[in-house]
Image (cartoon, rainbow, N blue to C red):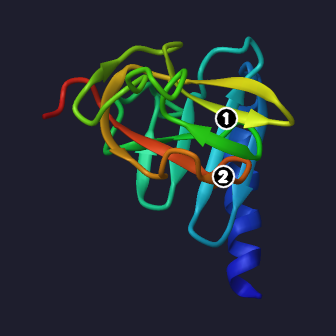
Amino acid sequence: MAELHDTVEAAARLLDLMRGTDVRRLRLAVDDVRIDVERDDGTPPIAQVTGAQVTGADVAGGAEAVGTGAVVAPLMGVFYQRPAPDQPPFVEVGQHVHAGEQVAIVEAMKSMNPVVADRDGVVARICVADGEVVEFEQPLLELAPAGSG
């Protein structure tokens, strides 16, 4: 119970730091630590923490990205690495990608939904197999900062 209290207190402090900024949403999970901060203007998150991985800019000061960060499923569906079965994958491990670049597809109810990178980086790992059913916000691939490697 003390752990939950500490988490709520930390979230409240974080919200105080963000007061007066363009942040529109703070999403927090306790197990496996997940914090997402979204801006009001639709630009990529200013902070995203998944487990021990930190990506994006520091809320208070604009620090550079540290470690890898996940590109997550925008909805539940079937993950596809390529635009069609007879075509090459959108991305491969080691490939540089840019924010806004399509990296996969998630099919839901016969609708093909593009998955795009939320930042520049290098594909460090593809987390799911082609054709696998994925959950909402499940990590699909990991991006390392573009300057690493």
Q: Position of residue 36 (x, y in %)?
A: 65, 43
Position of residue 88 in the picture relative to residue 145 (left or right) = right
Position of residue 142 in the picture relative to residue 9 (left or right) = left
> Toward the viewer: 104 or 67?
104
Q: Earlier in the sequence, mark 2 or mark 1?
A: 1
Q: Secondary structure at mark 2?
A: strand
Residue in the image at 37% along x and 26% along y: 91
Q: Position of residue 61 (x, y in %)?
A: 46, 28
Please tell me whether residue 51 is drawn above or below residue 60 in the rendered image: below
Give the position of the N terminus as an image quadrant: bottom right
Q: Position of residue 55 (x, y in %)?
A: 44, 38
> Toward the viewer: 141 or 23?
141
Labelled disc at residue 106? 1
Total numbered circles: 2
- Check whether the beta carbons of the residues at disc 2 and disc 1 lie within 8 A of each other: yes
Q: Amino acid at mark 1?
A: Val
Q: Amino acid at mark 2?
A: Val
Identify the residue at the far front of this view.
86
> Toward the viewer: 78 or 145?
78
Few, some or many residues within 10 Å of mark 1 (<14, 14–19, 20+): many
Labelled disc at residue 3? none
> Toward the viewer: 10 or 115?
115
Give the position of the C terminus as an image quadrant: top left
Residue in the image at 37% along x and 30% along y: 63
Quarter of the image where one finds residue 3: bottom right
Please tell me whether residue 70 is drawn above or below residue 112 in the rendered image: below
Mark 2 to mark 1: distance in Å?
A: 8 Å
Q: Secondary structure at mark 1?
A: strand
Few, some or many residues within 10 Å of mark 2 (<14, 14–19, 20+): many
Labelled disc at residue 134? 2
